[in-house]
Image (tube, rainbow, N blue to C red):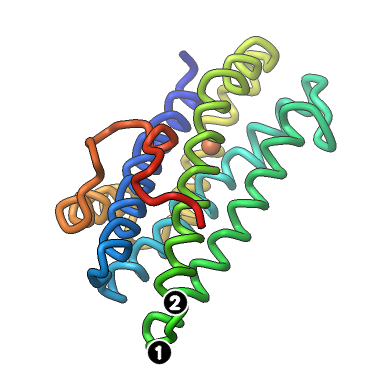
Amino acid sequence: MKAAIQELMDDHTVILRMLGVLEGMCRRLSDGGRVESVDLDSALDFIAIYADQTHHGKEEDYLFTAMERAGFPRDGGPVGMMLIEHRQGREFVQALRLAAKGLKEGSPSAAEDAMSAASGYAQLLAHHIFKENNILYPMALNAIPKEDWETMTRDFARVEAERMGPVKRAGYEALVARLETVYPPLEKGRNVARQSGACPPR
Ligand SMILES: [Fe+2]
């Protein structure tokens, strides 16, 4: 296993844990309970910085670019599909951000909107991660030449240093662990894509 791919898969493990937290938040709201604004804001910060800016940044700016050089088109095929799903994820996150604002302002539809956006995002991203781990990354491992992997490992270290900010990887992992204790996933480490019924899409 190349170090760069191992790093992306390690990112996925942490992101999947946060998806479990989102579903825990969803269940809390569905039961008529309360999700603290500070916790929802922390989850949104993790999604924006750790998942999107840093992890998707490593993929879009370096892995997918190396795959493109190896012959995979960016406008279609598996790389194009992953890019479409990244954009769909950003739309769910934007909806969740609006719902979080509504919850703070006491909007009557905010809890429903938050559940819809959070469960939609969790399901989309869990399936997306499954496809990357099991289909896209093996394709990349076969296609990308050795020298590109060496450069990519250095590029990833720079992306983390520049984009993850002062919280750093350890800080985000600590955040996930704290939120897991407040909004426990159904089963720790379980693939949230299979948690149907926990917080069904509305
Ligand atoms: Fe990914």
Q: Residue furthest top?
A: 142
30 sits to left or right of 158: left
Q: Residue furthest left?
A: 181
Q: Dot 1 corresponds to which residue?
A: 105
Q: Tell me which amino acid carries mark 1.
A: Glu
Circles 1 and 2, Cβ within 8 Å, touching? The answer is yes
In the rendered image, residue 101, in percent from the top left (x then y), is placed at 45, 81
Q: Tell me which amino acid carries mark 2.
A: Ala
In space, the residues marked 1 and 2 are separated at their CA atoms by: 9 Å
In the rendered image, residue 161, in percent from the top left (x then y), is placed at 44, 51
In the rendered image, residue 190, in percent from the top left (x then y), is placed at 30, 31
Q: In the image, what residue occupies the spot 63% across and 60% down? A: 91
Q: In the image, what residue occupies the spot 51% across and 57% down? A: 202
Q: Local crowd at mark 1 within 10 Å, few (<14), some, or many (≥20)? A: few
Q: In the image, what residue occupies the spot 78% across and 28% down? A: 68
**8 up-or-down from 111: above or below:** above
SS assignment at label 1: helix
SS assignment at label 2: helix
